[in-house]
Image: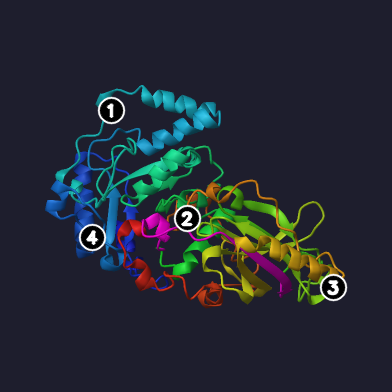
Amino acid sequence: KDVIQVLKESAFAHPANNPYPVIISIEMHCSHDFQKRMWEICRDILGDMLLILDPDVDKMGMEALPSPEKLKHKIIIKGKRGMQTKAGEDEEKESLSETSSNDGDSMFGALEKSRSGRKADDAVPATDPNWAMLPYLWAIKFTGFHNPGHAHQMSSFGESRVRKLVDAERTREHFVTYNKKQFSRIYPKGSRVDSSNLNPITSWAVGCQMVALNYQTGDAPMSLNFGKFLENNQFGYVLKSPYLRGTGHRMEPLILRVTVLSCQRLPNNNNSRDIIDPYVKLDLHGVGSDNKQGLYKTRTVLDNGFNPVFNNGRGETFAFEIYDPDSAILRIIAMDEDVGQDDFIGACSVPVSVLRAGYRHVPLLDEYNTAVRQAGILCRFWMDPIEKREEILELNSKKSQKRGSTDWTTPLPSVTSAASAAVGAANSHVSTSNVTPSNATSTASKEPTSKTSTDLTSFKSFFSSSRENTSPTAALNQAGVDS
């Protein structure tokens, strides 16, 4: 009851100020009487905020979900309507079986074996009819792409299963088609006992709407998730690409060139009195040949965290061939070179599809996506058609020789796959968390003088004005599965 009350008071209030629908996933294990009590709590507290299926839709099914724009200030419940066992939802069983088969974890394998041997009389009593009317999104077991359901029916997939579906070209296209009509939720495999995160781009690239992440873990996937949702002012919904919506083609392949010129006001995060030795890394996260991490970094500038300048002010340039720009995200990372292990200073993730050409100041965020006050990296971005690859290589080579420096440009990497290797256009859908509160960590107390709340205005210079979903209203005035 307390949780539902807090949800009502804070779901659409300051500081989020998000009017778009909130989806609650409820895994039901209660008896018939407690289900009835839960229905009474939701009815009395949430009232008209609850989105309930129309009785006719309940009987005949739904062909298309309404847009988030039409569901402002609504709370949607996702759950099962029928009987389920005490062992939990099918997704939990699948997660355990994935772990035992793919990771060789005998503990999880034994647990799955013991659960599978339970008798049918362990089942919970049939769902209370009142509670059964509350779920707007019905959780059903996925039985294959040959048996599509209605728009309000959704399934959950473990990350290992998603990888298998995406790796096979035939099932990959079926998955894209499935996600044009129905919701899919992706969850981490059971062996992630350290609360590590899966790579969300794999799922976004085939149109999956919800990718559950462990928000208490500050890692690269969380940075990618934060960067993806910046595209729509962090409203929790982002419009899919035209290809994934079935209204257009993939974005054309391109060459992205990034010149790292200088950094400003980089903090010392290791609590020592040493002056930092900064350098900048560029990681491209994508699908297929677009996935490039740990390959590109600048030279280290010694003893200067205030205003380090690269290559005497000319900067160091790096080039990426990108065959699926809709799904690619560029992560720019500032590091401190140290003995043994280099220290993380800050990073920023930006979708390639919304990058603007020109000189840009890249604001830095810490591990938990809190702005590092006044810290940033000055870069210049170019986007050219992939057909100009040889021309760019020749131009860069001449400029490098003229300046007498081999640091001006980094040659394009060899390409081992054609444009068809890209698995699809990416899309960040509904912001989803898989939080374990007991493991949550805060870094606010580490360096209070250099941290501040993230100001979204500092990111606006990145975004292309031609991108069709820069406006929240325009982006969300689409069918629900398209965002």
Disc 4 residue type (three-letter): Leu
Where disc 3 sits, the SS reads: helix
- Specify the quadrant of the image occupied by residue 448: bottom right
Out of 40 and 303, give the one closest to the viewer.
303
Range of the magenta residues? 238-266
Earlier-in-chain disc, 2 versus 1: 1
Q: Name the residue under label 4.
A: 50
Q: Is 170 included in the stretch rendered in magenta?
A: no
Query: How far is mark 4 from mark 1, CA to CA?
Result: 31 Å
Q: Are marks 3 and 1 in contact (CB under 8 Å)?
A: no
Q: Where does residue 207 sit, x and y in percent of width and height? A: 41, 52
Query: How far is mark 2 from mark 4, CA to CA?
Result: 33 Å
Q: Mark 2 points at which residue?
A: 425
Q: Which of marks 3 and 1 is in front?
A: 3
Q: Which of marks 2 and 4 is in front?
A: 2
Earlier-in-chain disc, 3 versus 1: 1
Q: Where does residue 113 sit, x and y in percent of width and height? A: 42, 23
Q: Which of marks 2 and 1 is in front?
A: 2
The furthest residue to the right: 404
Earlier-in-chain disc, 3 versus 2: 3
Q: Are marks 3 and 4 in contact (CB under 8 Å)?
A: no
| Quadrant assignment for the N terminus | bottom left
Where disc 1 sits, the SS reads: helix
Residue in the picture at 61% in, 61% down? 387
Disc 2 residue type (three-letter): Ala
